[in-house]
Amino acid sequence: MSAGCLVGIPSGVAMLTRLSGPMLVFAIGVMLLFFVAWQTLSHRVRATLPFHPAAALLAGFLGAFLTASTSLGGPAAAVYASFRGWEQKHALASTSMYFNFVNGSVVLMQWHSGLYDEGVFDAVSISLTAAVLGVIASIPVVRRMPQATFRKLLLMIFFSGVTLVGRAVL
């Protein structure tokens, strides 16, 4: 999967620097709708995809491209892990290693492309501690979250996707 990043990251950064705001908003809205559809229908997917370098390369490319251009590369990796039938701990370990590589590379390439200025670094330095605390606080909450609450969150994500697509089109 990481080999697919070699093409996916530069392609995603190039897309980010060339697309207009409405096009990016549209793409993010479509990806949110895809995520909701996947979460709704994924229980019907059978893990039937044996390891094949081309499939891993494609999943790596898509995940890196989407991460570099919209920061939403997770669904591509999650779909690949589901089709491979990885257990939760293997999927988490594999995708964590993959995204550490991708995110580090994306930051370097976006910085090199001139997408970061002093304001971005200031904002990150202020928000990073709060973001880490938020992730840590979310772990026990997610473990205890009832399925009905998760479905309500999916509904909220669905409406967010529809709203973004609508704003981009109108």
Image (cartoon, rainbow, N blue to C red):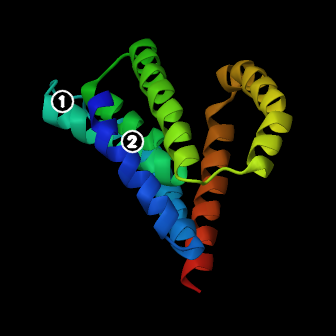
Name the one closer to the observer, 11 or 142. 11
The residue positioned 23% from the left and 32% from the top of the image is 56
Q: Earlier in the sequence, mark 1 or mark 2?
A: 1
The residue positioned 31% from the left and 34% from the top of the image is 80
Give the amino acid type for the residue marked by disc 1 in the picture. Answer: Thr
Considering the numbered disc 1 on the image, is that residue within a helix, a strand or a loop? loop
Q: Is residue 135 above or below residue 164?
A: above
Q: Is residue 71 left or right of residue 89?
A: right
Q: Is residue 100 above or below residue 103?
A: above
x and y, in percent, of residue 47 in the image: 24, 28
Q: Which mark is residue 98?
A: none
Res 157 quadrant in image: bottom right
The residue positioned 61% from the left and 34% from the top of the image is 147
Residue 41 in view: no
Q: Disc 1 versus disc 2: distance between alpha carbons?
A: 20 Å
Name the one closer to the observer, 119 or 80. 119
Q: Which mark is residue 48?
A: 1
Q: How many marks?
A: 2
Give the amino acid type for the residue marked by disc 2 in the picture. Answer: Gly
x and y, in percent, of residue 114 in the image: 59, 54
How many residues crowd around disc 1 within 10 Å: few (fewer than 14), some, or many (20 or more)? few
How many residues crowd around disc 2 within 10 Å: few (fewer than 14), some, or many (20 or more)? many
Q: Which mark is residue 63?
A: 2
Considering the numbered disc 2 on the image, is that residue within a helix, a strand or a loop? helix
